[in-house]
């Protein structure tokens, strides 16, 4: 097991990282519009690749689809570092509990490798990159690691796990404290149902009032067929089709990049319109 981790660390060494980081796709410069936040949300089918070269090549596959758009926020799925599992020297692994234990112990290495690439991506694209690994959810803004709630000059965003999307009170507190965008790096389900999408991010975009960014990992994952639909949600009255979606994946699998412009003034007007004053007149009682 020690030999396996040693070989993995060697395959994902910093020297190899620096060489491949120089091949990351560059964005086309775009003039940003005041009051509008551009976002890109990724859904990817799981694929096992080897080393930094394979990982950066895969990430570039998505970046070329958004480079003209030049987003301010990019959201990748949860467990993104599992893509590195193709780097494992599988001949040294035996199936069963030992295989799972080795993967768990080595996930610190794969998570760090994924984090290094995403940090550099956020720096050269001058944007926020949000993603999840086996070590948890993470966010970088212009090359600097952020807390799960952070603020830029254009927006305030909260990065939350899927389980938090059922806590209406907590989500309302986020909005009351100035958060206007919620992002959840997601992962597909084997027993996916259409209601799964609406119960979490979509429903609370309507109830609480925020822009929701939901990414997803789908496809074959260790023999399981994962399904999901990446989406960008918003309160129904401010979506053009009045369905609560700015954009969503039409399929439950496949590589997809969703691009959307979030009108922050329109959302703010919606939130303020729901604040109703209550005036009591006890003299008439």
Image (cartoon, helix red, strand yellow):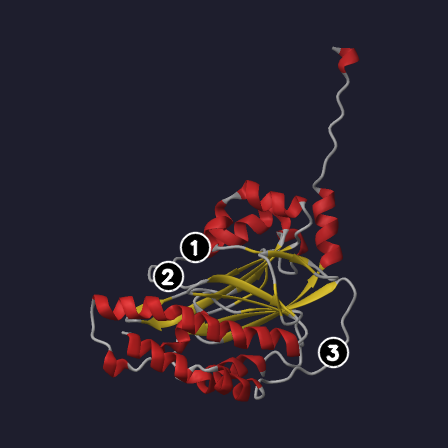
Residue 119 drawn above or below residue 200: below
> Please, what secondary structure does the residue beneath circle 2 have?
loop
Disc 1: CA contacts within 10 A as few (<14), some (14-19) or many (>=20): some
Residue 253 visible in the displayed image: no
In percent of width and height, residue 275 lies at 71, 39
> Please, what secondary structure does the residue beneath circle 1 have?
helix
Q: Earlier in the sequence, mark 3 or mark 1?
A: 3
Left or right: 12, with 282 as reference point: left
**Mark 1 = which residue?**
196
Mark carried by residue 189: 2
- At horizontal 59% and vertical 77% (from top left) the residue drawn is 120
- At horizontal 54% and vertical 54% (from top left) the residue drawn is 202
In percent of width and height, residue 222 lies at 30, 71
Q: Quadrant of the N terminus?
A: bottom left
Please state which of residues 111 and 266 is positioned toward the viewer in this rendering.
111
- Image quarter of residue 65: bottom right
- At horizontal 47% and vertical 87% (from top left) the residue drawn is 53
Residue 264 drawn above or below residue 208: below
* Mark-to-mark CA distance, 3 and 1: 36 Å
Q: Earlier in the sequence, mark 1 or mark 2?
A: 2
In percent of width and height, residue 74 lies at 59, 70
Is the Cβ of the residue at disc 1 closer than 8 Å to that at disc 2?
yes
> Please, what secondary structure does the residue beneath circle 3 have?
loop
In percent of width and height, residue 72 lies at 67, 69
* Mark-to-mark CA distance, 3 and 2: 36 Å
Q: Earlier in the sequence, mark 3 or mark 2?
A: 3
Please state which of residues 202 and 79 is positioned toward the viewer in this rendering.
79
Residue 179 drawn above or below residue 87: above
* Mark-to-mark CA distance, 1 and 2: 9 Å
Left or right: 36, with 171 as reference point: right
Disc 3: CA contacts within 10 A as few (<14), some (14-19) or many (>=20): few
**Mark 3 = which residue?**
30
């Amino acid at each position: 097991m020690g030999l396996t981790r040693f070989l993995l660390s060697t395959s994902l060494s910093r020297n190899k990282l620096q060489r491949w980081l120089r091949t990351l796709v560059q964005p086309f410069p775009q003039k940003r519009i005041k009051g509008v936040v551009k976002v890109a949300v990724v859904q990817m089918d799981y694929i096992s690749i080897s080393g930094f070269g394979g990982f950066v090549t895969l990430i570039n596959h998505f970046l070329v689809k958004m480079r003209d758009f030049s987003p301010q926020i990019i959201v990748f799925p949860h467990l993104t570092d599992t893509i590195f599992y193709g780097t494992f020297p599988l001949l040294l692994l035996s199936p069963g509990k030992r295989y799972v234990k080795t993967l768990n112990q080595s996930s610190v290495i794969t998570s760090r490798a994924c984090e290094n690439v995403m940090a550099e991506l956020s720096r050269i694209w001058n944007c926020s990159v949000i993603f999840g690994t086996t070590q948890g959810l993470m966010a970088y803004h212009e090359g600097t690691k952020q807390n799960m709630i952070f603020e830029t000059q254009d927006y305030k965003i909260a990065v939350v796990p899927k389980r938090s999307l059922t806590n209406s009170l907590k989500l309302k507190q986020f909005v009351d404290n100035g958060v206007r965008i919620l992002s959840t790096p997601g992962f597909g389900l084997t027993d996916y149902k259409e209601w799964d999408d609406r119960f979490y991010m979509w429903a609370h975009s309507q109830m609480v009032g925020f822009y929701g960014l939901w990414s997803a990992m789908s496809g074959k994952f260790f023999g399981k067929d994962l399904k999901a639909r990446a989406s960008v949600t918003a309160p129904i009255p401010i979506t053009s089709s009045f369905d609560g979606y700015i954009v969503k994946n039409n399929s439950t699998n496949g590589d997809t990049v969703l691009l959307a412009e979030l009108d922050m003034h329109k959302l703010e007007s919606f939130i303020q319109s729901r604040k109703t004053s209550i005036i009591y007149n006890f003299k008439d009682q």
